Amino acid sequence: MAVPYSQLEWVGLHNYAILFQQATFRTALVNVFLYSLANLIIILPLALLLGMFLYQSTIRGKNTLRTVLFVPYMIPTVAVAIVWGYLYEPQYGPLNQILGWLHIPPQNWLGSVNEAMLSLVILNVWQTLGYYVVMVVAGLTEIPQEYYEAASIDGASWFQQQLYVTLPLLNRSLAFVFVILTINTLQIFDPVYVLTQGSPVNSTDVVAYQMYVTAFNYGQAGLASAMAMVLLAVVLFLSLLQLRLFRTI
Amino acid sequence: MIHVYMKRSNNLRIRLRLSSQMLQYLIMIALICVMLFPFFWLVASSLKAPNELGAVPPIWWSAHPDISSYITVFQVVPFARALLNSTIVTVSSTVGILVTSIMAGYVFAKHNFRGKNFIFICVLATMMVPQFIMLIPLYRMMNAFNLTNSYPGLILPNLANGFGIFLMRQFIAGIPNDLLEAAQIDGASEWTILWRVVVPLLRPAAAALILFAFVFQWNNFLWPLSIVYSQDMSTVVLSLNGLRTYTSSITFTNIVMAGTAIGILPSVILTLWVQKYFIEGISITGIKG
């Protein structure tokens, strides 16, 4: 890793050529893409519903809910990973016990090829949902109240008001949530490093983790930098694409 | 007849509203329970005895809660040293970010010079660059300066950031020019105007920035992991990671959980104390920007 500059050689695109021949790197790209997609599918609707719930509901104590949703976002991801690693523990953890009460057979969670990635997604949803809810609430407060009054005078039901007033006017905030969520999830590193190290059988191997190991464990800074550049290209391409899509809707 | 009908429909409406409120309370309480459960499990496990940790099915609350794990954690790893390291690194970079953000934000908001917009766009662009992109070049840089495994190595790369400059520029732009001109006429220098006139007006923004910077530094994992290689330079988050691999047996989990509980405490307290400012910060930079 710490080879002096004088000993570094110009290799052109050689590192990229090696990279795309590696099946493990393609796996890591696919994994991180699926991880990001799963987070989008779960967090986006949940953040929208909870944001509307927090903004419109008249019940008392909803600020407590907002705080409780927001706190996990502010604590170290390493700490979150440690606690969830224990919750997921197949034998001693409480999650399988709770599943047992519901007559669902125990799961292998982080130890299973099929469930490990989903377990990391659930961890991330728990930790970051509150942040996206706050962004949705901020967007909702910007919508003038008169629009709702006008809609209800015209006889629009609550559901119609949400569909034809809230959603179109929330477009900008949702685009923002979409882009930030994509950028953040494509960079997943901490939970993978702490909990799975890419196992079982590469099922949770992601680009940032592979890059770190390539640079600091194998000492191949050039190859690792090529990985970082590919991930940056993916992040930029997806963010621009999403911004474009939202503008045309 | 009509009167009776109306009364009945009113009763129905009230009942509907009540049941809808009940439903909302139920949803809220269920969500709060789901969100708090990991915190409950964290604290409950830190108080369990080793034989209770190995119980199948798991025991939810210890028969004899025991806080000795909160002392043991300081004996198995240099956790006190890690707390000190984290405090030094976090406080220095937070102060650094605050000073650089206020100064740069003031210039971008209230001064005009050639190329200003281009430089400001460059600053904004740094916000889009993910942390992992800078990891290898930064590491090589710190290595060349012989700063790996040291406080400057941990602090220097975090002394300024685009988000802070952007946040401060947005706030300072809202301060009326008349106020600054009045100070100028009274003979105040640029330096005096900035620290005596502008800064006192920035309290809410500064609070938001301090808290974001503090929490980000305290929670940071990737950079310390890359640059620190001896235990005496470990930050709290690094120690937690080390603690987890060190005590891999289930019977030591109470120690890991005690360390984790201590490690998250500063972030939790800060968030509860001033979450209003955090949320304002997100709203300002996120939506109005």
Image (tube, coloured by chain):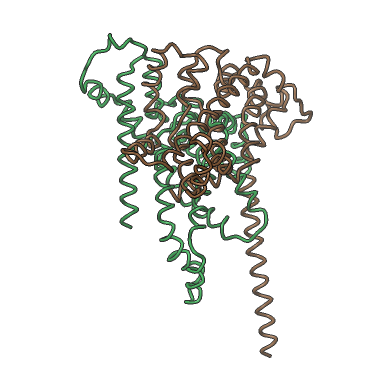
Q: Which chain is brown?
A: B
* Of A133 and A138, the residue lying toward us: A138
Q: Is residue B179 left or right of residue B247?
A: left
Q: Where is residue A9 in the image (x, y as percent from the top left)?
A: 24, 13
Is A96 drawn above or below residue B86 in the view shown?
below
From the viewer's side, name the closer residue of B115 and B226: B115
Query: Quadrant of the image for the N terminus of chain A?
Result: top left
Q: Residue furthest left?
A: A12
Question: Residue B250: x percent and y percent?
Answer: 63, 22
Specify the colour of chain A: green
Q: Which residue is drawn at 51% across and 14% down?
A: B150
Residue B156 or residue B200, whichever sits in front: B200
Give above or below for B39 relative to B220: below
Q: Identify which residue is drawn at 65% across, 65% down.
A: B19
Depth check, front residue: B139 or B115:
B115
Where is residue B81? Give x, y as percent. 62, 16
Asked whether, in this view, residue B132 is left or right of residue A191, the answer is left
**Residue farthest to the bottom?**
B1
| Residue at screen point 39% across, 50% down | A175
Q: In this view, does A117 lie above or below B287?
A: above
